[in-house]
Image (cartoon, grey):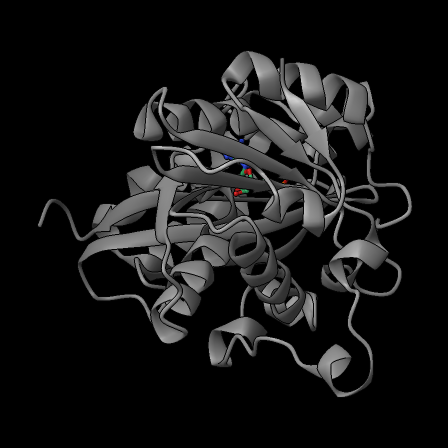
Amino acid sequence: MISVVTTKVEVLGLLPIAGRTAVVPTMGALHRGHAALIEGARDAVGSQGRVIVTVFVNPTQFGEGEDFERYPRTLESDLRMAESAGADVVWAPTTDEVYDTDGVAAAITVDPGPLGTQLEGASRPGHFAGVLTVVAKLLLVTRADVAYFGEKDYQQLTLIRAMATALDLPVEIVGLPTVRDDDGLALSSRNRYLSAEQRVLASRIPTAMESGTRAATHGAEAVIDAVTAALDDPGLDIDYIEVRDTDLSPAPPFGAARLLLAVRVGDTRLIDNVAITLGGAS
Ligand code: AMP
C-alpha cells in the first residue's frame, strides 16, 4: 500500500532503509509521462530503495495571470497512478508546510542566473527562481539520493542540474525522454485544458518539430523558418521558437543542438523541445 504524507516531520520520520531514496517531484495531475519517471526511479533503486513522489502545485513558480488557481488537482487518481508505477510514498504538502519560514528566511531563494531570464524565463519572470527553490527544498527534506525529471521541461532540467552542481547538492539528477501521445503531442497536465478543436491544432506542434528536425542539415535559421511556417495558423500564437546548444548556450554552427518552442493555443501555453543535429551528422 502506498503511504501518503503531508508534513515535513512525517517525511523526515520515514523509517531508515537499506537502499537509496529516489524522488520524483511533480505538480500532480499525473499522466504516463510522470509514470515513466516513477518507473525509472523504481528501476534505479530496486526493491531495497524508496521512491517518493511529491505532489505540490507550487505557487511561487506561477506568475500573475497564470493558471495557478485552475491547475488540475487530482490527488485521488494521482495516488493510484503513483502506486501502480511503483512509488512507496506520496508527499503532498500544503503551501504553508513547504513555506514555513518567515522573516529573513522567507525572502531567501535560489537565483537561477542569466539562463533563468531566457526562453521560458523571458515569458515567465520569476518562474525558475520559484522552481529551483522548491526543488531544492523538496530534495533536501526527502534526503533524495537521486531525482528524476522529464526532458519535456528541458530548460528546467538544465537549470536543476546546474543548481545541483552549483550548490553541491548531494543528489544525482536524472533526465528521461518526453512521453508523447499517439500523434506526437507531448503529454502534459495542461493538455486537459484544450477543447477538441484546440487539441487537433496542438498536434501541429510535433509535426512542426519534425519539419524543423528535417531542416537542421541547413542550419539553425532553416530550422526556425521551417517550424514557423508549419505553425502558421490563426489559432496558434507562437511565444518563441529557438535553437540552442544542448546546454542552452547559443547554438553551435553544426552538431548536437536543441530546438525549443512555446506556443499558445487559446488560453493554454504548451512547450516542447527535441534534440536536433545541425549541419548534418557530426
Ligand atoms: P509537472 O507535474 O508538469 O511539474 O512535471 C513533473 C515532472 O514530470 C517534470 O520533471 C516534468 O518534466 C516531467 N514531465 C512532464 N510531462 C512529461 C512527459 N510528457 N514526459 C516525460 N516527463 C514529463
Q: Position of residue 48 (x, y in %)?
A: 35, 24
Tell me which corner region of the image, top left, top right, bottom left or bottom right, holds residue 88: top right
Specify the quadrant that holds the N terminus: top right
- Viewer-closest of 89 and 218: 89
Give the image quadrant in which the ligand numbered 1 is located: top right
Q: Judge left or right: residue 94 versus residue 186.
A: right
Residue situated furthest left in the rendering: 282
Tell me which corner region of the image, top left, top right, bottom left or bottom right, holds residue 243: bottom left
Q: Judge left or right: residue 159 versus residue 256.
A: right
Q: Looking at the image, is 173 positioned above or below residue 251?
A: above
Work out whether residue 179 can be spotted.
no
Q: Where is residue 133 in the image (x, y as percent from the top left)?
A: 61, 66
Q: Position of residue 267 (x, y in %)?
A: 83, 44
Residue situated furthest bottom in the rendering: 104
| Residue at x 45%, y 53% (from the top left corner) | 157
Q: Looking at the image, is 133 positioned above or below residue 183?
A: below
Q: Position of residue 257 (x, y in %)?
A: 28, 54
Tell me which corner region of the image, top left, top right, bottom left or bottom right, holds residue 176: top left
